[in-house]
Image: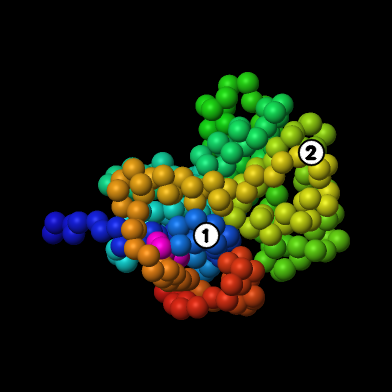
């Protein structure tokens, strides 16, 4: 069957292991308000950050396939663990699909901001172990020093809504203090859940350290790609946001609203 031609009014697909990628949806809706968006959050299989690369690759291909079945014209991989472990794999698998992920935009932002080229990166175990951030940072600037730290307890702390809590402050100190001692001047938040910890991180970090949240840089990269491919929606009506999840666990509504910054509407559960 010949694939139907891509139309600018077709939706952009975004997937994440859960609801964290909604922080990116928020940025995309701000920058590209006329784009129709379809989001898939794989809540039934969250977390990805503790899974093996081959498992993350398989999930990422399935998520992309699901979004393609809903007619997406382009894909955003919002999940850092997927982008790190499966970004190349997904691109090879879906050669004709324009794809943006969160790593390169965050790396570009960090290299632009850092003055001393000592950059910290906090993320899930899968992202840190992939070494992708380090690879991209070094490819952009060979003199950069990268200090990475896996913070496996941050995702459950955020999921429990404990972003303003002594236990979280303690874990921030434990995970992030060694990076501060390395005299980093920039810290990449390499996980979709971490933007919710920005106030707590700012309380702990010296003011001179710049935090990099990939949401807006990724939205800008998406806009650039849509323009290049001539598929940016020229419409002037607010784009539709359609949400799919593979499960609705407890705290679902609360978490979703916190990540998206507005009430969730039209959420459909799809069984995987
Ligand atoms: N979405 C994941 C990421 O950005 C965080 C949660 C998980 O471990 O699945 O790495």
Q: Quadrant of residue 157?
A: bottom right
How would you rate the neighbour count of disc 2 (Cα within 10 Å): few for under 14, some for 14-19, many for 20 or more?
few
Q: Is residue 113 visible?
A: yes
Please, is residue 251 above or below residue 226 in the view? below
Of residues 154 and 137, the one nearer the viewer is 137
How would you rate the neighbour count of disc 1 (Cα within 10 Å): few for under 14, some for 14-19, many for 20 or more?
few
Asked if the residue under mark 2 is in contact with the one under mark 1, i.e. CB atoms within 8 Å, the reply is no
Of residues 217 and 135, the one nearer the viewer is 217
In what element is the residue under mark 2?
A: loop
Of residues 243 and 178, the one nearer the viewer is 243
User: Residue 116 location in percent, x, y?
Assistant: 72, 26
Which residue lies under the disc numbered 2?
A: 208
Start-end of magenta stretch? 34-40
Query: Is 124 on the left-hand or right-hand side of 236?
Result: right
User: Residue 30 location in percent, x, y?
Assistant: 52, 60
Any magenta on residue 38? yes
Mark on residue 30?
Answer: 1
Q: Quadrant of the C terminus?
A: bottom left
In what element is the residue under mark 1?
A: helix
């Amino acid at each position: 069957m010949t694939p139907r031609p891509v139309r600018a009014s077709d939706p952009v697909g975004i997937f994440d292991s859960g609801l964290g990628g909604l922080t990116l949806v928020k940025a995309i809706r701000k920058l590209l308000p006329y784009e129709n968006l379809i989001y898939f959050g794989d809540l039934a299989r969250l977390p990805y950050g503790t899974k093996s690369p081959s498992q993350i690759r398989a999930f990422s291909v399935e998520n992309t396939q699901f979004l393609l079945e809903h007619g997406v014209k382009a894909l955003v991989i919002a999940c850092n663990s997927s982008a790190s472990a499966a970004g190349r794999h997904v691109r090879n698998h879906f050669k004709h699909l324009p794809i943006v992920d969160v790593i390169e935009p965050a790396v570009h932002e960090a290299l632009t901001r850092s003055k001393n080229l000592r950059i910290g990166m906090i993320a899930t175990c899968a992202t840190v172990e992939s070494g992708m951030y380090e690879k991209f940072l070094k490819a952009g600037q060979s003199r950069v020093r990268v200090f990475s730290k896996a913070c496996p307890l941050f995702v459950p702390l955020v999921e429990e809504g404990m972003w303003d809590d002594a236990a979280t402050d303690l874990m921030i100190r434990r995970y992030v203090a060694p990076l501060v001692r390395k005299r980093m001047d920039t810290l990449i938040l390499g996980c979709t859940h971490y933007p919710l910890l920005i106030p707590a991180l700012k309380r702990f970090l010296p003011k001179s350290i710049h935090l990099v949240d990939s949401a807006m840089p990724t939205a800008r990269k998406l806009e650039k790609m849509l323009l290049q491919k001539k598929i940016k929606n020229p419409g002037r009506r607010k784009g539709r946001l359609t949400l799919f999840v593979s499960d609705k666990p407890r705290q679902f509504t609360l978490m979703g609203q916190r990540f998206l910054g507005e009430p969730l509407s039209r959420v459909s559960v799809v069984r995987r």
